[in-house]
Image (tube, rainbow, N blue to C red):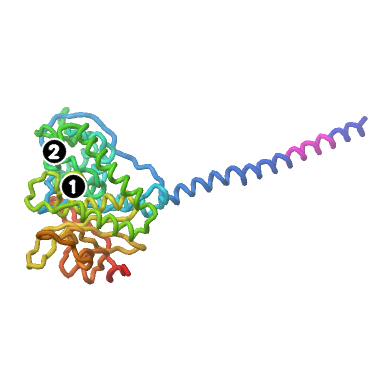
Amino acid sequence: MNKQRGNLLLTITIIIACIAIIGGIGYLLYTVLFLDDQTTGAQNLENNGFNQNTLVQNEETSNQNSYTNITPILNEENPALNVIIIDDGNQGNEEQLLSKTYYYNQLNDYAKTIYEGFKEHKEDLKSGIYQIDFGTKFNTLLHTDNGETELNEAFQSAWNAFSYDESDLFYIDPSKMTLISESTNIGGIVSYRVLIGPGDHENYLLETFETKEQVEQAQSYIQNIVDQIVEQTRQNSDVEKAIRIHNWLISTISYDEQEQNANRYSVYGAIYDHKAVCEGYARSFKYLLEEAGVSCVLVSGTATNSEGTTEEHAWNYVQIDNKWYAVDITWDDPVIIGEGTLPEDMRYRYFLKGSESFFMDHTENGMVSENSMNFAFPTLNQEDYNLE
């Protein structure tokens, strides 16, 4: 009887051992074939630069006591320009995605919070009346001695950076966008609530637009043109895309010498009205290259023309083969008196230039407006790009 019991226990032990071995092999296969795939997939997402930004949340309300307007920067004397490096939806690498927030990354924490509010409510801004409510996020700052000044600078810097990083804000008049500070005093304890809205203005839309529907119609028109250009340049190299878009804009846009068109500083004025000033040229070049998958930066500064006159100006930096080159599309489109054809050597005088030649008559200026931080631009390659 004891011998049978011993045999039974031995049999049970062997069965349990076999089950454990089989289970171990199964778990090993599961780890290798399934969990490893999940880990690899997560790593690939990280390597491709996918992330989730935490945006501003609304908080409690209070009573209004002061407000500040954004300094107008959409004008020829003080162009609002921006850097954008493109994610074409296919490559999606980390460098490209980070470059899309090139100016955002230069902001301090307060300005980043305001920028994030603009970004989160970009669609709402099309109404021209939407108020971005930051609640009491700046309460601690506003209790410091220099808090109001710091907040005003953060507000202006945030808008400048947002305007730099976004290429389709042609419908907003920043001079009518207002920072509102409201306070509540309960039992001697003061708390501050901050909002951004139209303030005393009816709205903060550019005079060309009255409703969100009109803004969306304009965007639809622009996007239709852009989609056609992107499709036609899909098989081109980055340099070929830059050349074709450069030439298309020169043949399409006329410089607005009268400066009477309210849209002359934007992509809408350039593509719809076919009239623009330097900022409109530069913004359009950036916007089209962005959609075509080429990294492009808008730059502000001054330039000295052939007559020795120095004036506020706007141009672009384009990234080709991991190097930056300058393009001044406005100065590549001189006014032709009478009928004639622009000689080839004049068409590309300011196309893909290096710092050595370009800075002979162009000077950068990262101070986009008063009461703002001074932004930095990418460093140009010293030599011109060889087009031959």
Q: Quadrant of residue 346?
A: bottom left
Q: Quadrant of the C terminus?
A: bottom left
Q: Which residue is mark 1?
A: 266
How dense is the environment of label 2, judged by Cα within 10 Å: few (below 14), some, or many (20 and up)? some
Q: Which residue is mark 2?
A: 208
Q: Residue at x 20, y 29 (%)?
A: 61
Q: Does the magenta run of residues contain 370?
A: no
Closer to the camera in the image, 251 or 2: 251
* Amino acid on which the number 1 mark rests in the picture: Ser
Whether residue 189 can be seen here:
no
In the image, is residue 14 part of the stretch drawn in magenta? yes
Does 338 sit above or below residue 32?
A: below
Res. 376 image quadrant: bottom left
| Residue drawn 77% across the image and 36% down it | 16
Closer to the chain start, of discs 2 and 1, is 2
Query: How many marks overall?
Result: 2
Left or right of 260, for residue 47:
right
Say the numbered circle drawn on residue 336.
none
Residue 325 appears at what percent x and percent y? 27, 64
Asked whether residue 171 is in view, the answer is yes
CA–CA distance in space, label 2 to label 1 = 12 Å
The region drawn magenta spans 10-20
Q: What residue appears at the point 14 percent right and 39 percent down from the top-left corner?
A: 206
| 201 vs 325: above or below | above
**Which residue shows up at 74% across the image and 42% down it?**
21
